[in-house]
Amino acid sequence: MAAFEKSREAEAVQLSAQERIRQVLLGLQGTTEIPGPIGELGLIIEDVAVTPAGKRRLVRIWLDRDLGSLAPGDESSVVAPLSLDEVAEATRAIGAALDASDAPGEAPYVLEVGSAGVDRPLTAPRHFRRNVSRLVEIWGIEGTAEAVGDHPVVGRLVAAGPTHATVVVPATKNDPETQRRIPYADIARAQVQVEFARATTEETT
């Protein structure tokens, strides 16, 4: 029983540390009217996680590009990925802010800051919008037009609006190329697919 109570106390402390860190990050992001250091870089805090790592804590923070600068109605322009310089500058600002606060708690911590990579699922319209031009895999909710047996829709994401994503499915031996407009409400899960040729090209540019 004592071990169980100790575990629950540790979990409560962990959750409170994560919430305190999140509050610091929101201050760094700021608002549209008054952006903070992260907002001034054109970035937003996508997610934060705090996990035990031995006697330390691992603080992982995912960044993404703010879409507020896009023109109204723009659903198809390509959003540039985060650069190493942008992530480095954001890391410095975040590290300084956390060190100046008591948000991480007394235990030492390791800070990891990066962009939301292709391994993170697409769960919101903004995730689809940021990945226009990429190859995606979309699984439909059972009973919808997108749920075709055990096979997902795999195609090039060419547009993403407030309610729908538009995907171009390449031609096959038996079917011509098709364009499908998929409501987000019909999507069970979606993920960007890794393209090795594209990744190599991006790394060399």
Image (spheres, rainbow, N blue to C red):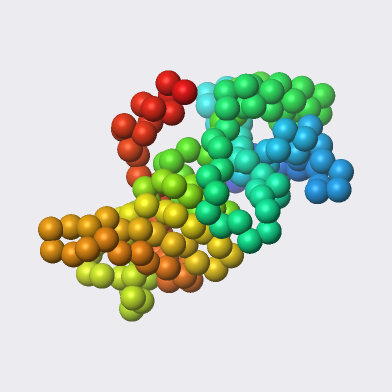
Residue 164 versus residue 98: which sits nearer the camera? 164
Residue at left offset 30%, top offset 64%: 178
Is 91 on the left or on the right of 128, as rendered?
Answer: right
Residue 203: % across, % down: 43, 24
Residue 65 versus residue 20: which sits nearer the camera? 65
Whether residue 34 can be seen here: yes
Residue at left offset 56%, top offset 37%: 80
Is 114 on the left or on the right of 22, as rendered?
Answer: left
Whether residue 4 can be seen here: no
Outermost right residue: 34
Residue at left offset 87%, top offset 43%: 34
Outermost bottom residue: 143
The image shows a total of numbered marks equal to 0
Is 156 on the left or on the right of 170, as rendered?
Answer: right
Residue at left offset 68%, top offset 53%: 71
Quarter of image, res 169: bottom left
Residue 204: % across, % down: 42, 21
Residue 31: % across, % down: 81, 47
Residue 182: % across, % down: 42, 68
Residue 11 versus residue 85: which sits nearer the camera? 85
